[in-house]
Each structure stands twice: as structure tokens, then as C-alpha cells.
Image (tube, rainbow, N blue to C red):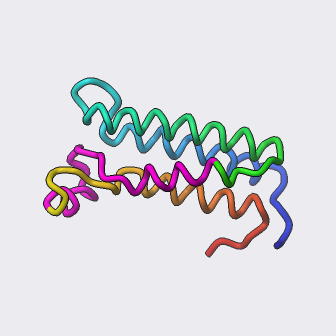
Amino acid sequence: MGDAPEGKLRAVLILAIPIAFVLDSQICGLGLKACSTLCNAFSFTLIGLGVLIAVQLLRGKSVGLLLLPMVVIALIPHCTCGAPINTIWQSILNGYAPTCQVIPSATALFAVAAMRGVRTR
């Protein structure tokens, strides 16, 4: 493994994780009319996990056990919003899509790898 980043890059990587989940939750919008209740519950859960992961990284602790539920939730078909990335999945999976949290989950995985000094490509 390489050297973990320091300074501003470290701060950017740590903040990227919760911010990615917050921004992603706004694609459908949080609220009663935006997405299904399950989708909103998963969004809030992932925002919380993102904050916990960022705090653990800030403290220099392991985040492996927090990454597992994040990845599992991202793979469960639950999203019902009409974002363009969902249209193919919704036609196949009876109206649900597992792709709502793929982009912030990938952001979190890359940020964690970079914080560990691994060169993410």
C-alpha cells in the first residue's frame, strides 16, 4: 500500500463520502411525493452510514464493517424514481431499480481506497 493523503486532499476524500449520499438523495428528493418510503429509508440509512464512514476515516479506524451494508443496500432493487439511470431496471424488475445508490457507493469505495493509500484507477 502507498501513503495515505494528507492536508486538503484528505479532507476532500473524507467529505466526499457523506456529500455523495446527500446529493444522490436529492435526485429523487426526500419527502412524501418524491420516491417510495423504502427508497427514502434507504437514502437516510446511507447518509448515516456515509457520515459514520467519514468519522471513522477521520479517526484513522477501520471501515470495513460499515462498507458491507452500504454495498448490500446499493444492490437491493428499491428505487422508484424516474431518474434516467433507472428506466431500464424498472422495466425489468417490475418498477424498482437498484441503481439509485451506485454512484455514491462507488464514490465512497474509491475514497476509502484512496485514504488507505491505494491508487484507484
> Residue 119: where, in percent of width, then height?
71, 73
Relative to 24, say whether 121 is above or below. below
118 with respect to 76 (left or right): right
Q: Residue at x 82, y 41 (%)?
A: 59
Q: Quadrant of the N terminus?
A: bottom right
For the point 55% across and 57% down, the residue is 107
Q: Is residue 109 above or below residue 36?
A: below
Q: Indicate yes or no whether the magenta region holds residue 8.
A: no
Q: Residue at x 72, y 38 (%)?
A: 55
Residue 20 screen position, x and y as percent:
52, 46
Say left or right for 55 vs 67. Answer: right
Numbered-mark total: 0
Q: Quadrant of the C terminus?
A: bottom right
Majority secondary structure of magenta residues = helix
Q: Residue furthest bottom?
A: 121
Task: Locate residue 4: give its quadrant.
Answer: bottom right
The image position of residue 62, as x and y in percent, is: 76, 51
For the residue pair 100 and 19, the one nearer the viewer reads as: 100
Residue shown at the point (84%, 54%) measured from the top left: 6
Q: Residue furthest top?
A: 32
Q: Nearer the viewer, residue 82 or 65?
A: 65
Q: Is residue 61 left or right of residue 105?
A: right
**Magenta stretch?**
66-91
Residue 72, magenta (yes or no):
yes
